[in-house]
Image (cartoon, rainbow, N blue to C red):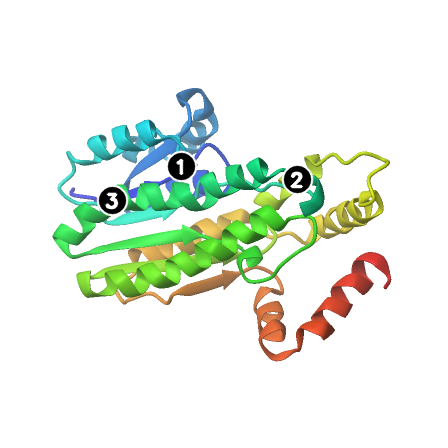
């Protein structure tokens, strides 16, 4: 059976791992990228449990390395077509702007923005030649709403949103769709990395970080099942009709986006600060 080809970056865990398996179950042959093969154990175990191991093609890829992306592009050249690209690789950097270095911001953008651009550029010549393809960029509610203590990640996801809007307009004449998936809070959510953020007791932001971590911890019981996001990605990849630009998903996400669209910022600001700081 001839299967369509899908690429998923960052498949060692979380959304990426689940997306790779769900796409394989949906009938795709999936090129699953990991930074190193020793990080693929969980993916391979899950693929075996779901009986789709034969449809997972493991490839190493560091989206921040020009050499790695170049080698990956050479690998892709043997495929006559690439039908779907899921740009999932990314991470979240927590902390407050004053206390983070510019290099830390650069590292965040290298993965979450420039990495997406590099991988997309490696795939586009194939998609454009065939005048078909679908690019699914894994964004976040952080791409639509700024949060304190997470400005590097929030800024990178806002950049991804703008990039995707432009790409969708650029690629539409070539039959290529660009889609944003915007998850809220999930059990394996990338936001969990803020749990590991350390801040010194003499920092002027220490009280703020404590409040943030407390809020995040109390909200974990309401986090969604990440499998729902992976199934949405597989559905978008498989559907025949042209997909929408944005797919927000998660508890309360559509309501939050609607409120931001209609309320003045001063009201939203007051609500956030009152929740976090009682101010």
Q: Mark 3 — residue? A: 123
Residue at left offset 50%, top offset 35%: 13
Instruction: Report the front residue among 257 and 153.
Output: 153
**Disc 2 element:** loop
Q: Is residue 70 left or right of residue 188?
A: left
Label 1 Cα crowd, 10 Å radius (few <14 / some 14-19 / many 20+): few
Residue at left offset 45%, top offset 54%: 160
Instruction: Report the front residue among 227 and 181.
Output: 181
Q: Quadrant of residue 92?
A: top right
Place of residue 275 in the rendered image (x, y in percent of width and height, measured from the top left): 80, 61
Q: CA distance from mark 2 to mark 3?
A: 34 Å
- If the image is split into quadrants, where does the C terminus sit? bottom right
Q: Mark 1 — residue? A: 50
Of callouts 2 and 1, the N-terminal one:
1
Q: Mark 2 — residue? A: 100
Label 2 Cα crowd, 10 Å radius (few <14 / some 14-19 / many 20+): some
How many numbered markers are drawn?
Answer: 3
Q: Is residue 134 left or right of residue 2?
A: right
Q: CA distance from mark 1 to mark 3?
A: 28 Å
Of callouts 2 and 3, the N-terminal one:
2
Circles 2 and 1: CB atoms closer than 8 Å: no
């Amino acid at each position: 059976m001839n299967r369509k080809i899908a690429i998923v970056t960052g498949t060692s865990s979380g959304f990426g791992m689940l997306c790779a398996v769900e796409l394989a179950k949906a009938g795709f042959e999936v090129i699953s990228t990991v930074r190193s093969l020793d990080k693929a154990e969980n993916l391979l175990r899950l693929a075996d449990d779901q009986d789709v191991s034969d449809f997972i093609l493991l490839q190493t890829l560091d989206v921040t390395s020009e050499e790695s992306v170049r080698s990956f592009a050479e690998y892709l050249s043997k495929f006559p077509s690439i039908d779907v690209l899921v740009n999932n690789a990314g991470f979240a950097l927590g902390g407050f702007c004053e206390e983070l270095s510019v290099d830390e911001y650069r590292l965040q953008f290298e993965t979450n923005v420039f990495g997406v651009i590099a991988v997309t550029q490696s795939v586009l010549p194939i998609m454009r030649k065939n005048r078909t393809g679908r690019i699914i960029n894994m964004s976040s509610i952080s791409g639509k709403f700024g949060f304190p203590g997470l400005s590097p990640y929030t800024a990178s996801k806002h950049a991804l949103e703008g990039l995707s809007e432009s790409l969708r307009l650029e690629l539409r004449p070539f039959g290529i769709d660009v889609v944003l998936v915007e998850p809220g809070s999930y059990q394996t959510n990338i936001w969990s990395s803020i749990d590991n953020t350390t801040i010194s007791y003499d920092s002027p932001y220490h009280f703020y970080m404590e409040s943030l971590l407390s809020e995040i911890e109390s909200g974990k019981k309401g986090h969604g099942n990440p499998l729902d996001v992976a199934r949405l990605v597989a559905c978008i990849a498989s559907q025949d009709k042209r997909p929408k630009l944005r797919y927000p998903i998660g508890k309360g996400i559509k309501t939050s986006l609607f409120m931001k669209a209609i309320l003045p910022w001063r009201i939203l600001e007051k609500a956030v600060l009152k929740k976090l700081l009682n101010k």
